[in-house]
Image (cartoon, grey):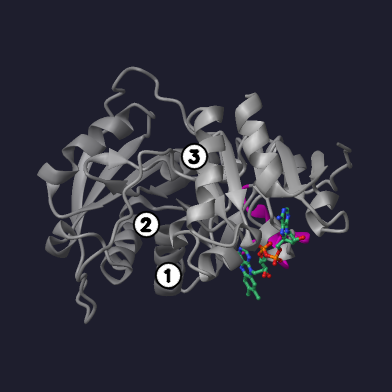
Amino acid sequence: MYSLARPLTAVAARSAARTFASAAGTTLVVVEHKNGAVLPATLHAITAAKQLGGSITAVIPAADAASAAPVVEALQQHAPSAILVATHAALAKPAVAEIVAPLVAKAAETSGATHIVAAHSSWGKNVLPRVAALLDVSAVSDAVAILAEDTFTRPIFAGNALATVKATDKVKVVTVRPTAFEPSAATGSAAGAPVSEISADATTATEFVKEDIVKSDRPELDAAKIVVAGGRALKSAENFQILYDLADKLGNAAVGASRAAVDAGYADNSLQIGQTGKVIAPQLYIGAGISGAIQHLAGMKDSKVIVAINKDPEAPIFAVADYGLEADLFEAVPEMTQKL
Ligand SMILES: Cc1cc2nc3c(=O)[nH]c(=O)nc-3n(C[C@H](O)[C@H](O)[C@H](O)COP(=O)(O)OP(=O)(O)OC[C@H]3O[C@@H](n4cnc5c(N)ncnc54)[C@H](O)[C@@H]3O)c2cc1C
């Protein structure tokens, strides 16, 4: 075992949680929800929105007021100043961005928003640039820190550089990286923000058809405290079982994969970690048979503790690992599982 120092990256930015009692007027938080529950990513976005220092209006896209009711109730726990339910009949099915964007733009107008914030999830990434275009302003994507009400830090070049950007537009449209902000904690009491309903013309040629959902009893990859990830070296989907065994021993750990493992069919696409997959920052990341390509590191290098198992001592993943084990994973992983 040996240990190597990790370069300072967004980890430094993550600790900078300040609030600006300043020019932010109203921040509109775009709420992502499913089956009546607010998705965890939105709770991280609420924390980012609070750091802007203005009042918070939550906008909930929904088919009607009745279907939004449990979401409204959950959001009251996070003490927004106001809640807007933005309705459109098409939202009875999962929301397509072409319908949601005009509703959010309308909500921005109604609330006089100076800022619009959403999580940098697949959904947020789809919706917010459209909102920015409708408002004729630029969008700031994947912010990892808020330096002032108009100044944000965001990673570029697959996380190899951090850019500080100043948004000079009248309305700042920002997606925030969930792992860079703590989730907002529920207050335990429904604060009773006023709820109003708005609607907007949103006609589109786009229609939701179907979704394929991978069912899993494990925690979501991007919410898990411990992640065990496997790469191309696993050689088959069956061999991934040794990672699941280790994850079980570690208790409620999620399993992830490199793109090479996903492309080879060893793991489902939803398990991919990296620039084109999920960005995670668990307490503990264990990577087995993963070389550590920059596109993979972009998705996990902010993990608190990184453990790498690789039989090549020159593998780049050792440069970011806190603990590295130069070993054959087919021996090391079962041995770890057995010893735990
Ligand atoms: C635009 C773009 C986007 C991309 N996005 C992503 C992304 O989101 N996520 C991602 O992961 N990749 C992404 N990639 C791919 C990335 O560049 C790498 O190809 C990929 O991460 C490699 O996966 P790997 O580490 O599993 O495989 P390899 O690079 O082949 O590494 C396998 C490693 O396993 C080790 N090994 C082999 N056998 C054993 C053994 N028995 N025991 C222990 N170690 C062993 C080897 O030494 C090697 O280091 C992207 C690439 C591009 C161009």
In primary-sequence order, the first of circles 1 and 2 is 2
- Which quadrant is the N terminus positioned in? top right
Distance, label 2 to label 3, CA atoms, is 29 Å
Sequence-wise, the earlier of marks 2 and 3 is 2
- Left or right, residue 8 beside residue 141: right
The vertical placement of 49 against 319, above or below, is above
Tell me the element at label 3.
loop
Which residue is the site of mark 3? 223
Residue 167 among magenta residues: yes
Residue 197 vertical position relative to residue 125 in the rendered view, above or below: above
Left or right: 254 in relation to 94: right
Q: Secondary structure at mark 1?
A: helix
Which kind of residue does numbered mark 1 sit on? Answer: Leu
* Residue tagged 1: 135
Q: Amino acid at mark 2?
A: Ala
Residue 281: image quadrant is: top right
Residue marked by disc 2: 108
Q: Are marks 1 and 2 in contact (CB under 8 Å)?
A: yes
Residue 72's x, y, as percent?
24, 37
The answer to which image quadrant residue 191 occupies is: top left
What residue span does the magenta drawing correspond to?
Answer: 149-168
